[in-house]
Image (spheres, rainbow, N blue to C red):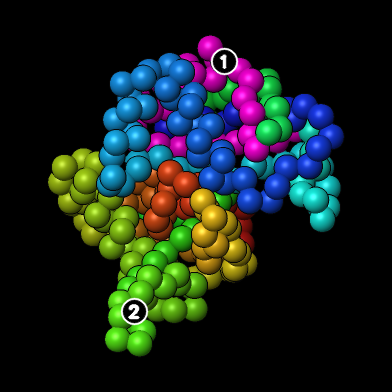
Amino acid sequence: MRLVIHIRKIGETPLSYDYQYALSSVIYAKIRCARKDLAARLHASKGFKFYSFSNLILTRPRFTTQGLKFENADLVVSSPDKEFITTFAEGLLSSPSFTLMRRRFIVESLEVMASPQLGNKEVLRTLSPILVRTLREEDGEKKEWELYPSDGKFYDNLHRNLVERYTAFYDEPPLEDIFEVTRILDVKPKRVTIDGTPRRCTHMTFELNASIELMRFAYDAGLGERQGMGFGCVDVVRKRIE
């Protein structure tokens, strides 16, 4: 299930480029506004988060050294959990204004998007960058390392993470475990600061061959890690790409 939120920024003060972490707090606050029990459950959970959200999709942005200047934006929030999306929408409707990094925003409208018909092969593009990590030995110690698509382990971990999250959400593994990135069409490395820590991640457009159940879960719940912090939201590219 997917919700598109149309928002308007109040005032001319630019918004910092590293707003993802703060935006995750806004989403949690709106959930809490509608249902404190669900918010508490999400906050207490140390496991997977079964939702993803996009970067702000800006209308006529101006990129300055101080940050982003814009008036209107869209935010996409997606989840296989209908209760989560419904509760989030209720929170926005009951309190349609919010503060993001000391900048004020107004929710102008909400739109529930119809789920597209998905096939076994789709071209996907990221609405927020994909984060994939691994552990590697360095100076005799295991250290966390963030992967780019140029590393073959990126795709292995992307696949494994999706299956693990699917199994955790549905309490059973997918009937068909088919997942292969068959073509990379565009890659843009990015660094995003989350709670003071810079993370290496990737915006990309790619062709995915997967079982319908994994394709659907990737679309609804996102790809990679840390979806609750604003990573891994994807959309389907319907126009033909050579």
State which quarter of the image contains the C terminus.
bottom right
Q: In the rendered structure, does residue 98 fall within the stretch colored magenta?
A: yes
Magenta stretch contains residue 87: yes
Q: Amino acid at mark 1?
A: Ser
Q: Quadrant of the N terminus?
A: top left
Q: Which residue is mark 1?
A: 95
Answer yes or no: is residue 100 visible. Answer: yes
Query: Which class describes the residues within 10 Å of circle 1: few (<14), some (14-19), or many (20+)?
Result: some
Identify the amino acid type marked 2: Arg
Residues rendered magenta in the picture: 72-101
Q: Is residue 36 above or below residue 18?
A: above
Q: Secondary structure at mark 1?
A: loop
Give the left or right position of residue 174, taking residue 210 as reference.
Answer: left
Along the horizontal axis of the image, is 27 left or right of 212? right
Question: Which mark, residue 136?
Answer: 2
Point out the residue furthest to the top here: 94
The residue at the point 36 percent across, 27 percent down is: 39
Quarter occupied by residue 159? bottom left
Q: Residue farthest to the bottom?
A: 139
Residue 209 is situated, as x and y percent measured from the top left of the image, at 39, 62
- Residue beneath the point at 59% across and 68% down: 189
Residue 174, image x, y percentages: 21, 51
Residue 213 visible here? no
Q: CA distance from mark 1 to mark 2?
A: 45 Å
Q: Residue at x 82, y 55 (%)?
A: 65
Q: Earlier in the sequence, mark 1 or mark 2?
A: 1
Residue at position x 45%, y 31% in the image = 28
